[in-house]
């Protein structure tokens, strides 16, 4: 389980590869993906359900789309403009989350505070499926926690996991992604003591040592201050999305904020 530390200090990446409804993340939906009727996205006690009456409901999170009985065979989709829409079987729109943002890759997240948040567009990507300087041997790891939000910190062998992929902030100051074909590492072993990974409120992943000196940066700084999310996706990609462009009201407050990374990265231009 990832170790999260709250910092009292004042968060984007990716490529959209459409997936079938059965392959969407357990707690997130990416641009181009669809949640079919009776599909679920869950995070702890919070369960987003695309009901058969055409209403999308976040159970225990105090939100619904108010689209009950407005269609049949309805599906929930996140567009490449950061808009959440529900369409019925004939293709007509019965719900839209609001105005469009710039074209890009977005992520709808069931947030641990009990709300839905759309982050994007994406800024930065870690890819363990291509060879390179940061490649390493793989292992199979069961799925556990897979997200880091702005302000959260990963430290002391804490990890994020998704299916057979594991991102570990190791005690030797090296950030390692086990999984994919080649894996990935930050190549920062021995560069500091008591290092931690932090995601900032400008979408930058940082590895810092115990003197708060930066050891490695994703160099994905956005011009916009806000809330970002790093998702270790089921396909092994580590992607930063943000800032948040839409969200429902929060059901629960939690202590959480900070994290960072340093890997073979790709810059993705918003279109």
Image (cartoon, rainbow, N blue to C red):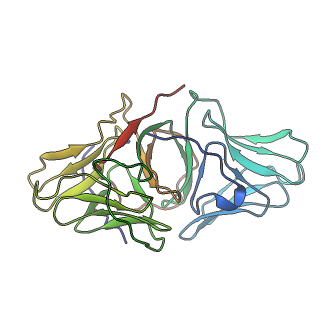
Please identify the residue farthest to the front as the structure is shown: 131
Residue 4 versus residue 108 in the image, above or below = below
Q: Nearest the camera: 158 or 252?
A: 158
Q: Nearest the camera: 40 or 226?
A: 40
Q: Residue at x 90, y 53 (%)?
A: 72
Q: Position of residue 77 (x, y in %)?
A: 70, 46
Whether residue 183 can be seen here: yes
Whether residue 255 can be seen here: no
Residue 93 versus residue 255 in the image, above or below = above
Q: With 157 as the anchor, is 201 left or right in this view?
A: right
Q: With 12 as the anchor, is 186 left or right in this view?
A: left
Q: Nearest the camera: 188 or 118?
A: 188
Q: Quadrant of residue 46?
A: bottom right
Q: Quadrant of residue 21?
A: bottom right
Figure disc tally: 0
Q: Residue at x 89, y 53 (%)?
A: 69
Q: Residue at x 25, y 69 (%)?
A: 157
Q: With 247 as the anchor, is 200 left or right in this view?
A: left
Q: Quadrant of the C terminus?
A: top right
Q: Residue at x 39, y 57 (%)?
A: 182
Q: With 216 as the anchor, is 221 left or right in this view?
A: right
Q: Position of residue 165 (x, y in %)?
A: 44, 64
Q: Quadrant of the N terminus?
A: bottom left
Q: Position of residue 156 (x, y in %)?
A: 22, 68
Q: Nearest the camera: 9 or 180?
A: 180
Q: Position of residue 249 (x, y in %)?
A: 56, 51
């Amino acid at each position: 389980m990832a170790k999260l530390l709250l910092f009292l200090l004042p968060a984007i990446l990716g490529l959209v590869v459409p997936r079938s409804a059965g392959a969407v993340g357990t707690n997130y939906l990416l641009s181009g993906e669809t949640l079919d009727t009776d599909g679920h996205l869950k995070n702890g006690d919070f369960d987003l359900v695309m009901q058969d009456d055409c209403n999308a409901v976040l159970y225990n999170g105090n939100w619904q789309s108010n689209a009950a009985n407005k269609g049949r065979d309805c599906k929930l989709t996140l567009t490449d403009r950061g808009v959440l829409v529900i369409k019925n079987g004939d293709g007509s729109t019965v719900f839209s989350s609001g105005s469009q943002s710039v074209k890009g890759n977005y992520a709808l997240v069931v947030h641990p505070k009990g709300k839905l948040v759309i982050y994007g567009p994406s800024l930065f990507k870690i890819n363990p499926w291509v060879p390179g300087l940061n490649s390493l041997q793989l292992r199979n790891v069961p799925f556990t926690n897979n997200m880091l939000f702005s302000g959260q910190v990963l430290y002391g062998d804490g990890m994020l996991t998704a299916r057979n992929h594991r991102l570990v902030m190791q005690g030797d100051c090296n950030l390692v992604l086990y999984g994919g074909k080649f894996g990935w590492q930050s190549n920062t072993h021995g560069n500091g003591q008591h290092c931690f990974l932090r995601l900032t409120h400008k979408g930058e992943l940082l590895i810092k040592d115990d003197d708060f000196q930066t050891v490695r940066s994703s160099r994905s700084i956005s011009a916009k201050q806000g809330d970002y999310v790093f998702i270790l996706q089921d396909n092994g990609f580590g992607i930063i999305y943000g800032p948040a462009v839409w969200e429902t009201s929060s059901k629960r407050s939690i202590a959480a904020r900070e994290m960072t990374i340093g890997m073979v990265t790709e810059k993705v231009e918003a279109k």
